[in-house]
Image (cartoon, rainbow, N blue to C red):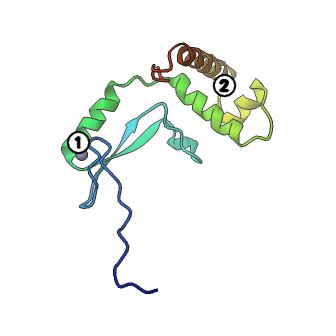
Amino acid sequence: MRTDRSPVPETDICDLCARRLTDGCQMGVVPDSSAIHARSPARDGRRLVVACSPEHLAALQQEYRTRPYVPEELWAGQIDRAQALQPKVLSRDALSAAAGLSLLEVQRALAWKNRDRRRYEQDPQTPEVG
Ligand SMILES: [Zn+2]
């Protein structure tokens, strides 16, 4: 069946107010230690945000500036990405090589993940970062 009507294009929403971005948008990159790119390690730790106006983009940038940037969280995400590509659980040495991290960074990231998991188990309402 043929129709003359074009499909409604996919639209994104403002990361601050959730308004549909039908008339263009403002974009910016903010620091975020929870942001792990699927394929490009060079883009880890930075998140693209979109907003409906310069004012909402500025508010988002300010929000991210006040969030803690936790290197251990970034390294934990990089370890998770590296491990996900492997058929078996890697040793710390192999994790270090696969994730491109030092052994000390791997150790600190794994300790952070354990603390974060215990914190979550004690109080599931607590956010998993920090
Ligand atoms: Zn907005």
Q: Badge 2: how crowded within 10 Å, few (<14), some, or many (20+)?
A: some
Q: Which mark is residue 37?
A: none
Q: Residue at x 54, y 13 (%)?
A: 122
Taking the view exactly as shown, the residue that stands out farthest to the left is: 55
Instruction: Name the spot of residue 59 as percent of width and height, x first.
Output: 24, 36
Three-letter code, disc 2: Ser
Count all numbered tags in the image, as a single digit: 2
To which residue does mark 1 refer? 56
Q: Is mark 1 within 8 Å of ligand 1?
A: yes
Q: Secondary structure at mark 2?
A: loop
Q: Residue at x 54, y 14 (%)?
A: 119
Instruction: Name the spot of residue 77 as percent of width and height, x first.
Output: 58, 32
Q: Is residue 47 above or below residue 10?
A: above
Q: Earlier in the sequence, mark 1 or mark 2?
A: 1
Q: Badge 1: how crowded within 10 Å, few (<14), some, or many (20+)?
A: some
To which residue does mark 2 refer? 102
Q: Is mark 2 within 8 Å of ligand 1?
A: no
Taking the view exactly as shown, the residue that stands out farthest to the front is: 1
Q: Residue at x 28, y 41 (%)?
A: 16
Query: Which one is nearer the viewer's eye here, 38 or 9?
Result: 9
Query: Which one is nearer the viewer's eye here, 106 or 112?
Result: 112
Q: Is residue 22 left or right of residue 46?
A: left
Q: Secondary structure at mark 1?
A: helix
Q: CA distance from mark 1 to mark 2?
A: 38 Å
